[in-house]
Each structure stands twice: as structure tokens, then as C-alpha cells.
Image (tube, helix red, strand yellow):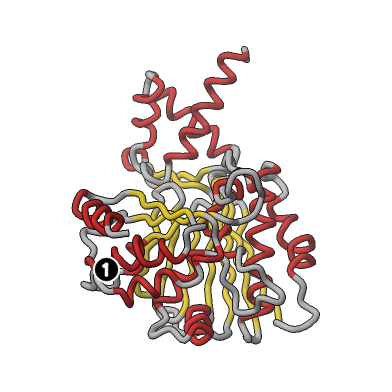
């Protein structure tokens, strides 16, 4: 097989693997259209992937369905105690199951898994933790589920917050930990940004960060006890830990000094961002950073008191802090400019 033909075949394989989940019944047509080939030729590529045991085929000739084949499905359970160590679990049990991944993806998994597993050991106050690993040709998912106290309730108690939903915003800010003597508070922040999808379910709250969509959102969860962390990553991601860390390091140093506050997460139900009390809650701990970006995506409007507290009062009290805003609509922008004009 010549090099150009081999390269095209590899491109077709990657396209099928990336799209078969969304087009289980018409993937052959999608391939034929994408690469200007016959349906018969597209089917040959599909059958080759079936033969390689990367995808599976079901249904009859007229209604064939294709799906990614699980390459690895493992569940492990551990007792939480002083002898449980995240690096040992990683090197002994988890890394061997992911050995086929490229080095950059493997480093991301080592960071994310050890950080989240260590949180269980140090903070969950639970008796056991279960790890589930799911791998296919496209991506890898790891679930870490403990039976301890819920993470959001624990943060709520530590900060005396009025409800556990406020705890989610504290995690989104970064630099928060209930045990500052042993933790920097960076683990969940960076894990939520280095993976394609990162989810925490706890205390009947579902927090998710999707990197590609740049979204954070809160929804109801049916997990009533403990905490479940779900991490997903494309096996062939071009991302690296260094690149993600640099996104939140201010120029000229390598410290975690920059954060983005997704203000949509501070809106619960029909509550808008109107009061000084809401602003003060959002502004807690921001003096630990050098640069802050307030992200107003999906925020329709803000109140005068909220804007004044953030962009005049707090800004005047912290002249050393660079305060910025992004994704504000014209209504929000006008209120921000009004507040800044009063400084």
C-alpha cells in the first residue's frame, strides 16, 4: 500500500471512530460523502474496523448499526484507610490499563486520577471507594465514587454557606481546600479544565464542565450519599498539562494567579445578579489571585448594586488586582461601565 493510500485509509479510520457514536445507522453514508467514495468502499473500511475489534456491527443488511467496541471495562474497589495511597493505586492498577495511550494523554490521566483519588482519601470520610474504567478506540472515562460525606456539603460547612450550590462556585474559582495545610486547592480546578468532560455528583447536585463548550452548569443529581467524579478524555487529544496550567498562570511566573468566574453559576432558578450580598459572596477569596475574569455568558442583566460592589467598591479596595470581564451583553456592559464611571 502506497503512503498516500495508507494516509487516506488512516484518515477514514479516524473519521469513523470519531463519528460512529453520533451516526450509528448512517455512518457508511457519512464516510462516502466525506471522502467522495462509493458506499461499498465505505463499508469495506467499516468491516476492517470490525475485524480489528475497534467497532461492533449489529442489525440486518438494511438496518446495520455500528458502535465503538469497549476495549476495557474494569471495576475496582478499595477500603479507605491510612494504607491506601493514590500513587500506588495508579501505578499498580490503573496505568497498566491505559498503557496504550499517547504520553500526553497518559500524563493528564495520571494527574487527574491521583488528584481526585487523593481527595477521597483525605476528605471523603468514607469507608470505601470504587473506580470504574471504560476505554474504547475514541476515548477513556474514569469514575471515582466514594461513600463518604458529600463534597458540596463539606465545603458548605467549611465556609458557612447558606446552601451547597454556593460551594460549586467556590470550586470553580479555584484555590479552595478544607485542609490548607496539606492541599493547595488547585486539584479540582485544573482537573475540571484539563479533561474534555469533568463532572462531580454529590448532595443531589450535578456540576459539569465541558472544555470544548466552555460551559459550567449545575443540575439536579440523584446521588444522595458520597461523591462521584467522572472524567473523560479523547485518547488522541493534543492537549497537555503544561498548556492548561499556562492558561491560568499570569505572565512571567508559573503560579496559579489567574481565574475565570462563570457568573451563570451564581444564578439559581429565577434569581438574577442584583444585590451587593450576591456580589460579596462571589468576591470571597478573589484577593488570592492577581488577575480575575468575570464571565457573563448567559447572564441577561445585573443590578446596579451588584455591579457597583464588584467594579467600584471591590476594585477600589484591591487596586493591585486586575479585574476584567468577558462575554457581557450590551445591557450588562452598560451597567458595568456605569459602575466604573463612579469609581
Q: Position of residue 159 (x, y in %)?
A: 50, 82
Left or right of 280: which side holds 79?
A: right
Question: In this view of the protein, which residue sits in the foreground, 20 or 223?
Answer: 223
| Residue at the extreme front of the image, as rendered | 343
Q: What's the residue at 64%, 73% (across, down)?
A: 119
Residue 207 locus on image (x, y percent): 43, 68
Position above or below: 15 against 255:
above
Q: Residue at x 47, y 59 (%)?
A: 319
Quarter holding residue 144: bottom right
SS assignment at label 1: loop
The answer to which quarter of the image holds residue 90 is: bottom right
Tag count in the figure? 1
What is the quadrant of the C terminus in the image?
Answer: bottom left
Q: How far across and how far down the image is residue 128, in percent?
A: 65, 82
12 lies above or below 53? above
At a point 36% along the width and 38% down the height, the residue shown is 61
Q: Which residue is mark 1?
A: 273
Residue found 74% across the figure and 84% down from its top: 81
x then y, percent, for residue 328: 28, 51
- Disc 1: CA contacts within 10 A as few (<14), some (14-19) or many (>=20): many
Side of 225 where 99 appears, left or right:
right
Amino acid at each position: 500500500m502506497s503512503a498516500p493510500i495508507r494516509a487516506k485509509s488512516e484518515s477514514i479510520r479516524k473519521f469513523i471512530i470519531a463519528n460512529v457514536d453520533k451516526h450509528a445507522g448512517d455512518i457508511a453514508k457519512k464516510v462516502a460523502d466525506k471522502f467522495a467514495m462509493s458506499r461499498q468502499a465505505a463499508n469495506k473500511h467499516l468491516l476492517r474496523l470490525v475485524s480489528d475489534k475497534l467497532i461492533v456491527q449489529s442489525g440486518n443488511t438494511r438496518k446495520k448499526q455500528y458502535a465503538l467496541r469497549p476495549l476495557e471495562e474494569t471495576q475496582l474497589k478499595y477500603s479507605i484507610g491510612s494504607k491506601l495511597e493514590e500513587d500506588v493505586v495508579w501505578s499498580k492498577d490503573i496505568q497498566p490499563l491505559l498503557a496504550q495511550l499517547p504520553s500526553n494523554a497518559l500524563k493528564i490521566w495520571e494527574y487527574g486520577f491521583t488528584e481526585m483519588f487523593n481527595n477521597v482519601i483525605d476528605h471523603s470520610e468514607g469507608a470505601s471507594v470504587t473506580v470504574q474504567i471504560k476505554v474504547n478506540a475514541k476515548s477513556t472515562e474514569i469514575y471515582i465514587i466514594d461513600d463518604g460525606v458529600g463534597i458540596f456539603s463539606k465545603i458548605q460547612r467549611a465556609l458557612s454557606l447558606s446552601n451547597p450550590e454556593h460551594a460549586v462556585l467556590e470550586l470553580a474559582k479555584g484555590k479552595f481546600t478544607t485542609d490548607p495545610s496539606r492541599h493547595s486547592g488547585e486539584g479540582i480546578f485544573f482537573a475540571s479544565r484539563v479533561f474534555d468532560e469533568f463532572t462531580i455528583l454529590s448532595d443531589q447536585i450535578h456540576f459539569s464542565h465541558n472544555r470544548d463548550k466552555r460551559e459550567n452548569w449545575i443540575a439536579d443529581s440523584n446521588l444522595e450519599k458520597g461523591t462521584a467524579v467522572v472524567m473523560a478524555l479523547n485518547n488522541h487529544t493534543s492537549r497537555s498539562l503544561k498548556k492548561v496550567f499556562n492558561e491560568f498562570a499570569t505572565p512571567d511566573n508559573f503560579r496559579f494567579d489567574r481565574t475565570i468566574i462563570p457568573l451563570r453559576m451564581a444564578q439559581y432558578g429565577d434569581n438574577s445578579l442584583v444585590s451587593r450580598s450576591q456580589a460579596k459572596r462571589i468576591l470571597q477569596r478573589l484577593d488570592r489571585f492577581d488577575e480575575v475574569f468575570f464571565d457573563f455568558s448567559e447572564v441577561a442583566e445585573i443590578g446596579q448594586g451588584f455591579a457597583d460592589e464588584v467594579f467600584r467598591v471591590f476594585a477600589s479596595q484591591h487596586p493591585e488586582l486586575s479585574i476584567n470581564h468577558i462575554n457581557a451583553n450590551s445591557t450588562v456592559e452598560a451597567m458595568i461601565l456605569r459602575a466604573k464611571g463612579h469609581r
